[in-house]
């Protein structure tokens, strides 16, 4: 289950709460040049393997996640980040509850 909402004014990271068995997100910035989205994953929640046409930066705010890029695992904890290159398959799995910022630049 995935739910999405948009932040239209001042946002706090705590405004996005975990939901059992789910991935929830809130778009903080959405412009033609890119997006910034806050995600909260419950433990064990996943985003299945997919590709995106643009580079994307994952910055972990709290918790721990396994990010697979081209089949290679990258375990990240709070304060760590990774770039998922455009057109490369990637997937995410919450090793514990975690929140992240996803920054996608479209230019």
Image: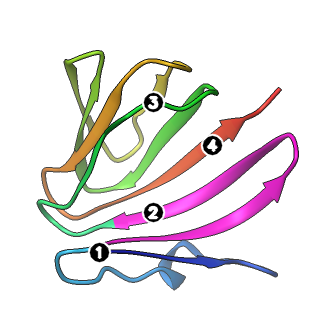
Q: In this image, 55 relative to 45: left or right?
A: right
Graded by Cα atoms within 10 Å as few (under 14), some (14 to 19) or many (20 or more), the crowding at tag 4 reads: some
Of the numbered discs 2 and 3, the one sitting upstream in the chain is 2
Residue that label 2 marks: 39
Image depth: mark 3 or mark 4 in front: 3
Magenta part, dominant SS: strand
Graded by Cα atoms within 10 Å as few (under 14), some (14 to 19) or many (20 or more), the crowding at tag 3 reads: some
Residue 5 horizontal/vertical position (percent): 60, 79
Give yes or no for contact between labels 1 and 3 (Cβ–Cβ under 8 Å): no
Looking at the rendered structure, the secondary structure element under dot 3 is loop
Q: Which residues are magenta?
A: 23-40
Residue that label 1 marks: 1
Q: CA distance from mark 4 to mark 2?
A: 11 Å
Classify residue 72 by image quadrant.
top left
Of the numbered discs 2 and 1, the one sitting upstream in the chain is 1
In which quadrant of the rendered image does the C terminus lie?
A: top right
Looking at the rendered structure, the secondary structure element under dot 1 is loop
Q: CA distance from mark 1 to mark 3?
A: 20 Å
Looking at the rendered structure, the secondary structure element under dot 4 is strand
Residue that label 4 marks: 103
Q: In this image, 19 relative to 84: left or right?
A: left
* Residue 33 within the segment the image draws in magenta: yes
């Amino acid at each position: 289950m995935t739910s999405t909402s948009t932040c239209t004014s001042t946002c706090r990271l705590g405004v996005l709460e975990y939901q059992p068995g789910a991935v929830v997100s809130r778009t903080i910035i959405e412009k033609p040049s890119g997006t910034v989205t806050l995600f909260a994953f419950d433990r064990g929640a996943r985003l299945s393997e997919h590709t995106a046409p643009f580079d994307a930066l994952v910055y972990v705010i709290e918790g721990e996640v396994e990010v697979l890029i081209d089949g290679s695992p990258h375990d990240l904890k709070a304060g760590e980040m990774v770039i998922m290159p455009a057109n490369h398959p990637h997937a995410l799995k919450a090793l514990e509850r975690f929140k992240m910022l996803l920054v996608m630049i479209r230019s």
